[in-house]
Amino acid sequence: MIVVIGASASGKTEIAKILTNKFKIDKCITTTTRLKRPNEVNHIDYHFIDKKSFLNLIKKGKFVEHAIYNNNYYGINKDDVKTNSIVIVEPNGANSLIKVYSEKTYIVYVKSLESVRKSRMLKRGDDVIDVNTRIESDKLVFRKENINRIDLVISNNHFCSLDSLAKKIYKKYQKFLEKK
């Protein structure tokens, strides 16, 4: 399983889309309580549910991991975990997946300049106050020291195409699988 970690607007979702579409890596769909963004599709991009339903799933022990990020719940339902898949999580989620699935996880950290991330968030229509809050919060949450293991660091600052970054991840992931 490819586990992708990166701050808001680092490009992780777009890279994951390329890996699923071009390289046929299945997407492990995360469950969330956050509102759908324009162009997002329920059960494709996320499983969008309300907070009460999410908390009920926690009580039933349905999640491999769950976290609160930006005042919304996110979690990976055990039923959605697939061997040859990709999932996007925050550092605590990655650490939980490493703990549960250990050698079956390939951890990719996507980094991007703060100025680039801020520009991307504003272009997609995020509120300016929310953008600034997320930028500040991400400085603490997405520090590399918060992640137990990183197998690959990718820089996404417009210097390489997303296709080339996805191809690099795919090639490194294939080498990782060969060793298993």
Image: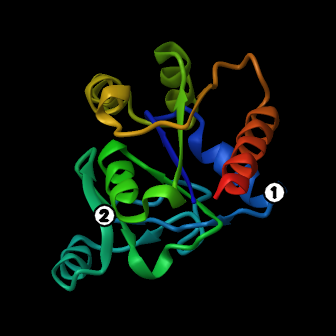
In-front residue for pair 127/161: 161
Q: Earlier in the sequence, mark 2 or mark 1?
A: 1
Q: Amino acid at mark 2?
A: Glu
Cβ atoms at labels 2 and 1 below 8 Å apart: no
Q: Is residue 148 above or below residue 21?
A: above
- Residue pictured at 52% horizontal, 68% vertical: 29
Q: Position of residue 35 (x, y in %)?
A: 39, 59
The answer to whether residue 72 is left or right of residue 167 is left
Q: CA distance from mark 2 to mark 1?
A: 26 Å
In-front residue for pair 125/178: 178
Per the image, the residue denoted by label 1 is: 23
Residue 143 placement: quadrant: top left
The answer to whether residue 111 is left or right of residue 177 is left
Give the residue at the far bottom of this rendering: 60
Task: Specify few, some or many for label 2: CA neighbours under 10 Å numbering under 14, 14-19, or 20 or more.
Answer: many
**What quarter of the picture does the N terminus occupy?**
bottom right
Q: Position of residue 79 (x, y in %)?
A: 45, 82
Give the residue at the far left of this rendering: 59
Q: Is residue 86 visible?
A: yes
Q: Position of residue 52 (x, y in %)?
A: 19, 77
Q: Amino acid at mark 1?
A: Phe
**What quarter of the picture does the C terminus occupy?**
bottom right
Q: Is residue 46 above or below residue 166?
A: below
Tag shown at residue 65: 2
- Residue pictured at 26% horizontal, 74% vertical: 54
Q: Position of residue 15 (x, y in %)?
A: 67, 43
The answer to whether residue 7 is left or right of residue 10 is left
